[in-house]
Image (cartoon, grey):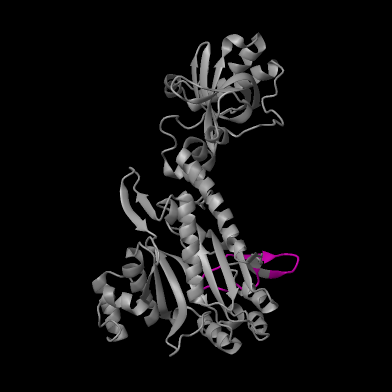
């Protein structure tokens, strides 16, 4: 019988269960059966068959045995993958001696192929009556507990394969993420955007203010960094004549890890020549709502705690709110916040419980107030506009010169997307980047990019969207680790 019976699982150590499975592995080989199978042509997937189920079909399906109920002559089991499961029924009376011996070697976690006719049980369960089965892969280690799944969060992240086979909700989330990425590509391509690829290894890390990962190319004898953003290369393509482009790929930042940050993350950047930040905001709003309606059942997104209780509902109904950066900060820190001195603003931060450091410049102090008192408390979509020019060196100044033509889209207490009217004046861009570099121009300023701008870049709108955060918001996931298949974790000692 199967070692997966609940009472035996609780009484046996993992080592004992592995030993039992190895005995079954040896038995399969004695029977002349390859325990690790080969090509198996299927007519349906388990989940696909369930969705389009009809009685009386002759089908071939392959999957992992996720549940097994052996009642002697009658055996019911579930066969599945990340897309779903289907029930199988086997009458062992119809098996010959070799087939029966092979079946007795199977456990939860094994991969098999089955062939048979579909029918509905008395309870209305879609089922395949098995006429033949083929062993495709013998699992030597037991699956997570059938009834409780994989409860330990760290194990979920370190051993994602166990999470996917034991938690149907987690598997469904990652399938949804993959489908969302495909839909984003389709959405942009239908609007004339071309997908491009730019270097991940760069000799000057640019396009954002972040600490890069550093490496060295031995053949060229030169230091390189993993990119922190693709922006400067994408703008080179605008100069070259591309007018609507996007890249959907990885960025790397050698900074902190939190429930909203992973050092390796997926970013969408798109540029639209002859457009501006307002048009890009409309594009992002339309695309996000399209994803919500297609994959989330509507524009109201529920976020739940670990016990399944709804903690908040995000309303994506259009049009989304627009709000002035300075107005939002004043609402949080006082109407006089921009009238008092920088030292008084620092004192106000202490009153507000906002942590700042002595080396922060005044605009950074203000930004810290914005992040802690505005951003983290804004859950429904809000485009924050008229952002201070010191924060965004790659965007056009608004008339008057104190702010830039930028939006910062806040949803669910975090920035989901910035969008710019891109700066295309090479002289102003040089001044901005040199100021940002703070005296380390030779190391931090991409002068080759400045030279490229001197060939003429058309006016353009640009966006960045943190895909991991977007998926978190749309699926209700509480941490970025729940939407990244293999998040970076500290190595266990």
| Residue 202: quarter of image | bottom right
Q: Is residue 212 magenta?
A: yes
Question: On the picture, is 94 further left or further right than 304?
Answer: right
State the residue at coordinates (41%, 76%): 385
Question: Is residue 25 part of the magenta span, yes or no?
Answer: no
| Residue 80, image quadrant | top right
Nearer to us in this view, 439 or 377: 377
Can residue 226 be seen?
Answer: no
Q: Between residue 193 and residue 146, name the one nearer to us.
A: 193
Residue 115, position in %: x, y?
A: 64, 23
Q: How far across and how far down the image is residue 426, in percent?
A: 60, 86
Question: Foreground: 137 or 345?
Answer: 137
**Circle count:** 0
Q: From the viewer's perspective, is residue 88 above or below residue 293?
A: above
Residue 285 appears at what percent x and percent y? Answer: 46, 65
Q: Would you say the magenta stretch is mainly helix, strand or loop?
A: loop
Q: Residue at x 66, y 86 (%)?
A: 454
Query: Which residue in the rendered view is the most extreme toward the right?
Result: 219
339 to 202, vertically: above or below: below
Residue 117: % across, % down:
60, 22
| Vertical comparison of 80 with 174: above or below | above
Does any portion of residue 119 appear in the rendered image? Answer: yes
Report whether 16 appears left or right of 307: right
Give the residue drawn at x 47%, y 42%. Answer: 155
**Residue range highlighted in magenta:** 202-222
């Amino acid at each position: 019988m199967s070692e997966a019976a609940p009472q035996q699982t609780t009484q046996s150590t993992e080592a004992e269960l592995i030993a039992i499975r190895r005995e079954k592995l040896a038995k399969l080989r004695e029977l002349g059966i390859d325990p690790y199978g080969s090509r198996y042509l299927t007519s349906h997937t388990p989940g696909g068959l369930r969705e389009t189920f009809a009685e009386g079909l002759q089908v071939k399906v392959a999957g992992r045995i996720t549940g097994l109920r052996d009642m002697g002559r009658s055996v019911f089991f579930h066969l599945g993958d990340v897309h779903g499961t289907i029930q199988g029924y086997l009458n062992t009376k119809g098996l010959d001696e070799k087939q029966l011996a092979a079946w007795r070697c199977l456990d939860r976690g094994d991969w098999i192929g089955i062939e048979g006719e579909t029918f509905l049980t008395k309870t209305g369960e879609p089922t395949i009556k098995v006429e033949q089965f083929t062993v495709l892969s013998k699992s030597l280690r037991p699956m997570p507990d059938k009834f409780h799944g994989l409860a330990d969060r760290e194990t979920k992240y370190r051993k994602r394969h166990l999470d996917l086979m034991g938690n149907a909700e987690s598997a469904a989330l990652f399938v949804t993420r993959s489908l969302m990425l495909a839909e984003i590509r389709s959405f942009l391509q239908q609007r004339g955007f071309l997908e491009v690829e730019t270097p991940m290894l760069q000799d000057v890390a640019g396009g954002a203010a972040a600490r890069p990962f550093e490496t060295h190319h031995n053949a060229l004898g030169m230091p390189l960094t993993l990119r922190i953003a693709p922006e400067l290369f994408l703008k080179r393509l605008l100069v070259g004549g591309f007018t609507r482009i996007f890249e959907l790929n990885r960025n790397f930042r050698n900074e902190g890890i939190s429930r909203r940050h992973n050092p390796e993350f997926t970013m969408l950047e798109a540029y639209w020549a002859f457009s501006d930040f307002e048009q890009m905001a409309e594009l992002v709003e339309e695309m996000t709502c399209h994803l919500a309606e297609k994959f989330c059942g509507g524009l109201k997104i529920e976020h739940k705690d670990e016990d399944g209780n709804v903690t908040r509902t995000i309303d994506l109904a259009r049009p989304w709110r627009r709000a002035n950066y300075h107005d939002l900060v004043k609402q949080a820190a006082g109407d006089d916040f921009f009238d008092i001195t920088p030292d008084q603003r620092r004192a106000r931060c202490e009153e507000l419980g906002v942590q700042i450091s002595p080396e922060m410049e005044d605009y950074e102090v203000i930004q810290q107030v914005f992040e802690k008192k505005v951003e983290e408390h804004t859950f429904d979509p809000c485009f924050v506009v008229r952002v201070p020019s010191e924060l965004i060196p790659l965007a056009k100044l608004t008339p008057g010169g104190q702010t830039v033509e930028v939006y910062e889209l806040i949803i669910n207490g975090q920035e989901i997307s910035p969008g710019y009217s891109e700066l295309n004046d090479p002289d102003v861009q040089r001044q901005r980047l040199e100021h940002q570099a703070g005296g380390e121009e030779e190391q931090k300023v991409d002068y080759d990019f400045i030279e490229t701008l001197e060939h003429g870049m058309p006016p353009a709108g640009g966006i960045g969207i943190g895909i991991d955060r977007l998926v978190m918001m749309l699926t209700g996931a509480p941490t970025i680790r729940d939407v990244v298949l293999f998040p970076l974790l500290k190595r266990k000692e």
